Image (cartoon, grey):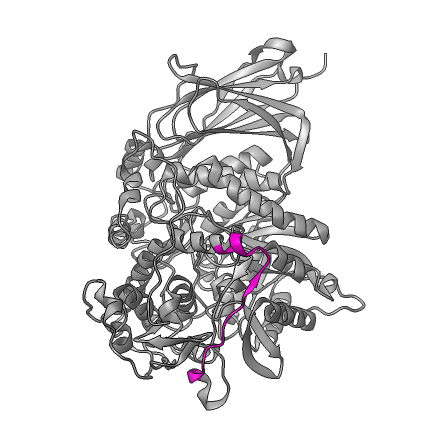
């Protein structure tokens, strides 16, 4: 089954997506607004121009746009196909994209004059070839899918978007229209599009500026092959290669006919597994040294840190096979936290239907789940819709299961740019952060006012990316008048600051990339601490836009997930929600970076959990922080001193002290070429105990493995019941004496592997 892009798919309530653009301390957006019969034809006022650090902010904005320009073309193309193919299956008419000549310098050099007209295929076909894909994606996306398509177009090719005439009035009309077409009227040549700039042949300003500089990338490893080769692609080649990658990953499980794999499937799973890990120190491997200081605590791991995020549509699939999905969600602990939201919460045109609330109630009962409910904010009638959703949540779900309500999703990525409405009686959208902040505060106060018996229930607004959001914006929002009455916590999303098309596993797993995100998070965490609020990562994944097949869904994704969980727990986040989006659809599955996609049996179309590579990183983290018992987290991260020694591998070691005084040590060899012997030194109180070692091993393709991955010798390959297959196996190791009265345990770590070392505190003599 072909994992689909989240852009342009057919749904009732919205389209999830992710981009790493926007925000920053300097933001220039654009919007359209209007009233009355001319609402879909109004001029576009200039967007917000606010800078607290103009030079660095402008540089950051250029880096952002340059870093992700290529991948969006692939996402848009795949998104159009992902919507078109299932509609063709059901007999719906699908209009083919207009033919266009290859891109050339003449695209902008000899433009054809344009008169005002409805946004349609004829208009799209007259744009430069790259813009045609954005335009057609919006024009052909059904209903609420246009929200994400518009946001993508606005961010990635504003020069053509700003002449397309998309404003909040016509966009709201398009969100309700479940058919090809648009109510938006494009701007004619000579009309102002942004500031004093005028449209000319569909280009705001009449000419395309030179491309921004690309951010530097780490040099490739001398032995790098495969995905690393994408780095050398020209921009126009990348979408073609990415589309071919997507086409090569059809999911065998999509044709499953039962919950138990047959003998041939089991044999195939064993064949996909890699060689076993060595039991003893390997001569010739370098040594990496790590000293765990159990008496130097760093940060307590929240009792339920690992969590998930889901779009509003298709959540009913979990309820339709509750037993199988219960096996999955019990891994998150006694009371998993599920965030309901994403793009679907701002794109929705009506409150979620009764069947969705009934599904949430069934899920809550089966999983003992808790929920962070995403509420709409982009629409002028958001107060009415959000209030009704809060009432329905309290009607269908136990009070203790409601963690809170997240108001709005990624406002800096809205198609109209960040902004707000002037008053409840005025539907005119005003761009700019100040307008947004006033609008958020007014809406939040209406939903959660001060008063006797009231307590803060709201979080938000789910800012788009740790890497780009201005800490000053978050501070102003957190310190707004009345915020103490309604704001229970702050939330932001995290996606690595990379180009999805050119990134390879080595770059994705580099420490520099992680450090960049952690540094940005710590600025925001400082704002939260100053206002006595917690900060939640309410949406995350290894790559934005649903991830990239062949990278996100391999052991590289496994390693990224595990390491990011430890890093952000150590940085002080209160939760880390992996975005599973819509889960999956019949015939197509889910996005590549999803730990557990939703697949469907061929004969009945009954949904079932399909475990993918990122999930194994979840298992390693849960074992390190909560043990094998599956309870709440019972650990505190402690200091670990490391020395790469003779090992040149990308190795990471995390130490944790359990509430009972034992230690657990998470070991990650994030290198695809270099194995290492990792020598772990422990304090004397652990020297008399036998250590248990639980291994995560890649398949035969190492870092590129999608299948054959094992945790403690077990695998989910070909399992449709949510259960690990095979017998669990762990190793026993005896610490040996080391200098200073301490002891050590040496663990040979093959490439692309992980492990958790458990050592109990020795009994007092």
User: Vertically, is 178 above or below 708?
Assistant: below
Q: Nearer the viewer, residue 10 or 226?
A: 226
Q: Does the magenta run of residues contain 683?
A: no
Relative placement, left or right, of 475 versus 74 is: right
Task: Look at the image and give the residue range highlighted in magenta.
Answer: 40-58
Q: Residue at x 41, y 69 (%)?
A: 150
Q: Please state the total of marks drawn on the protein image.
A: 0
Q: Quadrant of the C terminus?
A: top right
Q: Does the magenta run of residues contain 51?
A: yes
Q: Residue at x 56, y 77 (%)?
A: 380
User: Vertically, is 44 above or below 706?
Assistant: below
Would you say residue 628 is visible in this rendering?
no
Q: Nearer the viewer, residue 173 or 503?
A: 503
Would you say residue 641 is visible in this rendering?
yes
Relative placement, left or right, of 241 versus 522 is: left
Residue 654: x %, y % from top left: 56, 30
User: Vertically, is 642 above or below 390?
Assistant: above
Relative placement, left or right, of 448 versus 360 is: right
Residue 602 in which image quadrant: bottom left
Residue 307: x %, y % from top left: 55, 48
User: Vertically, is 2 above or below 10?
Assistant: above
Residue 642: x %, y % from top left: 54, 23
Q: Residue at x 54, y 14 (%)?
A: 734
């Amino acid at each position: 089954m072909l994992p689909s892009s989240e852009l342009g798919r057919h749904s009732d309530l919205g389209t999830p997506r992710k981009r790493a653009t926007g925000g920053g301390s300097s933001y220039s957006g654009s919007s359209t607004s209007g009233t009355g019969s001319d609402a879909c034809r109004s001029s576009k006022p200039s967007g917000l121009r606010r800078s607290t650090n103009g030079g660095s902010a402008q540089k950051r904005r250029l880096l952002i746009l340059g870093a992700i320009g290529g991948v969006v073309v692939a996402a848009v193309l795949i998104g159009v196909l992902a919507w078109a193919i299932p509609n063709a299956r059901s007999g719906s008419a699908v209009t083919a994209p207009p033919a266009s000549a290859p891109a050339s310098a003449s695209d902008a050099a000899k433009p054809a004059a344009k008169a005002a007209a409805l946004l349609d295929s004829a208009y799209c076909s007259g744009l430069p070839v790259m813009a045609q894909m954005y335009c057609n994606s919006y024009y052909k996306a059904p209903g609420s899918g246009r929200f994400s398509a518009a946001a993508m177009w606005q961010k990635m090719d504003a020069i053509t978007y700003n002449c397309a005439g998309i404003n909040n009035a016509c966009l709201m009309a398009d969100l309700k229209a479940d058919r090809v077409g648009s109510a938006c009227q494009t701007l004619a040549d000579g009309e102002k599009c942004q500031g004093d700039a005028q449209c000319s042949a569909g280009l705001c300003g009449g000419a395309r500026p030179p491309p921004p500089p690309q951010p530097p990338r780490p040099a490739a490893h001398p032995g790098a092959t495969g995905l690393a080769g994408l780095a050398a692609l020209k921009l126009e080649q990348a979408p073609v290669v990415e589309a071919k990658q997507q086409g090569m990953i059809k999911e065998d499980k999509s044709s499953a006919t039962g919950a138990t794999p047959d003998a041939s499937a089991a044999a195939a799973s064993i064949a996909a597994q890699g060689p076993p890990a060595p039991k003893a120190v390997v001569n010739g491997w370098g040594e990496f040294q790590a000293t765990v200081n159990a008496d130097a605590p760093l940060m307590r791991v929240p009792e339920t840190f690992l969590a998930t995020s889901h779009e509003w549509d298709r959540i009913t699939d979990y309820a339709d096979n509750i037993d199988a999905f219960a096996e999955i969600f019990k891994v998150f602990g006694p009371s998993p936290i599920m965030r309901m939201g994403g793009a679907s919460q701002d794109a929705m045109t009506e409150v979620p239907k009764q069947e969705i609330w009934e599904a949430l109630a069934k899920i809550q009962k089966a999983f003992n789940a808790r929920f962070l409910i995403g509420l709409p904010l982009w629409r002028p009638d958001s107060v009415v819709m959000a209030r009704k959703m809060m009432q329905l949540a309290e009607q269908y779900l136990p009070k203790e299961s409601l963690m809170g309500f997240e108001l709005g999703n990624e406002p800096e990525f809205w198609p109209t740019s960040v902004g707000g409405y002037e008053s409840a009686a005025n539907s005119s959208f005003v761009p700019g952060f100040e307008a947004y902040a006033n609008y958020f505060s007014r809406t939040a106060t209406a939903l959660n006012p001060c008063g006797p018996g009231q307590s803060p229930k709201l979080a938000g607004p789910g800012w788009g990316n740790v890497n780009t959001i201005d800490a000053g914006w978050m501070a102003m929002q957190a310190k707004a008048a009345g915020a103490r009455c309604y704001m229970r916590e702050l939330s932001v999303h995290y996606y690595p600051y990379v180009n999805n098309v050119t990134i390879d596993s080595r770059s994705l797993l580099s420490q520099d990339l992680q450090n960049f995100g952690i540094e940005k998070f710590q600025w925001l965490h400082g704002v939260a601490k100053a206002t006595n609020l917690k900060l939640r990562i309410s949406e995350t994944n290894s790559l934005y836009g649903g991830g990239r097949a062949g990278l996100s869904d391999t052991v590289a994704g496994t390693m990224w997930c595990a390491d990011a969980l430890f890093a952000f727990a150590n940085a002080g986040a209160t939760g880390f929600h992996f975005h599973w989006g819509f889960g999956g659809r019949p015939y197509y599955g889910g996005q590549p970076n999803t730990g557990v996609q939703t697949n469907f049996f061929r004969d009945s179309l009954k949904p079932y959990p399909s475990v993918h590579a990122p999930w194994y990183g979840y298992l390693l983290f849960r074992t390190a922080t909560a043990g094998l018992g599956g309870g709440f987290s019972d650990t505190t991260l402690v200091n670990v001193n490391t020395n790469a020694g003779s090992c040149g591998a990308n190795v990471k070691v995390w130490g944790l002290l359990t509430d009972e005084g034992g230690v657990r040590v998470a070991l990650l060899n994030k290198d695809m070429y270099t194995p290492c012997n990792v020598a772990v030194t422990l304090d004397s109180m652990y020297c008399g105990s036998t250590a248990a070692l639980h291994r995560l091993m890649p398949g035969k393709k190492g870092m590129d493995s999608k299948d054959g991955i094992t945790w403690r010798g077990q695998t989910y390959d070909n399992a449709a019941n949510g259960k690990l297959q095979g017998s669990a196996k762990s190793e026993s190791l005896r610490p040996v004496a080391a200098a200073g009265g301490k002891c050590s345990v040496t663990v040979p770590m093959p490439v692309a592997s992980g492990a958790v070392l458990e050592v109990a505190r020795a009994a007092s003599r």
